[in-house]
Image (cartoon, grey):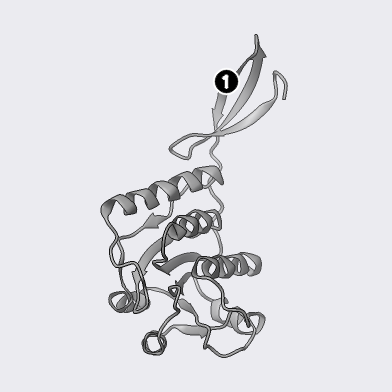
Amino acid sequence: MNSGDTIEVIDSAAQRFSATLTLANHRVTAHLDTLSTASEIAGRWRITLAQALPKGQKMDFVIEKATELGIAEIFPLFCERTVVDDVGPGKLERWRRLAKTAAQQCGRSTVPEVNDAQSLTGFVPCFKNYDTILFPWELAGPQPLRETLPPLVERAREILIIIGPEGGFSSDEAARAKDAGAHLISLGTRILRTETAALVVLAILNYVS
């Protein structure tokens, strides 16, 4: 780029600025011109992700990529087959920092809230706060999403996606979720990894929105 070219600058508070570059003596300076008043475009839905805690650093990946795909809120979950049995404050703070940096990187003006971890059983009463609850499960009916998804989200505003752990949801968990209003859906014939499933659902929702 050359002197006089303009760029967009996003600061640590997710404010957007227009800036002009000056190149002189092997130095590049960006002069902030104006604070942009453009706000983040609101999506068709406000989407919340309840993600069963995976092993290792996989939750870092889920939070980062879900943020890029527009997730509004994240609930880490303990399920019957969850291997992780504890989440300390240090890990929660790390996830919140990741959500913030991912939001800045992709130009979001809002940062998803990463909540304290809780059990799926304890989270079920919160189902009533959502218009549509999507519960991907490998034992759900084989109907393709192109047929099942549109009617489920057509009139929704608040959508909840619930993703199971490495070993999948138990039949009891799926039954309790269904009784509480969740829609058991299939993501196809292949069994996806837990860190892949949420991103597949979010990508599909972005496509149909």
For mark 1, give the secondary structure.
strand
Residue at 42% x, 66% y: name it.
Answer: 54
Residue to which mark 1 is pinned: 31
Q: Amino acid at mark 1?
A: His
Give the side of residue 209 with respect to residue 70, left or right. right
| Residue 94, percent from left and from top | 37, 49
| Residue 27, percent from left and from top | 61, 14
Q: Residues within 10 Å of mark 1 (few under 14, many from 20)?
A: some
- Using the rendered view, name the quadrant where residue 129 is placed: bottom left
| Residue 29, percent from left and from top | 59, 18
| Residue 5, percent from left and from top | 70, 24
Give the side of residue 165 with respect to residue 92, left or right. right
In the picture as drawn, the residue positioned furthest to the right comes out as 2
Closer to us: 143 or 209? 143
In the image, residue 30 sits, relative to residue 70, either above or below, namely: above
Give the side of residue 31 with respect to residue 80, left or right. right
Closer to us: 207 or 194? 194
Residue at 38% x, 56% y: name it.
Answer: 113
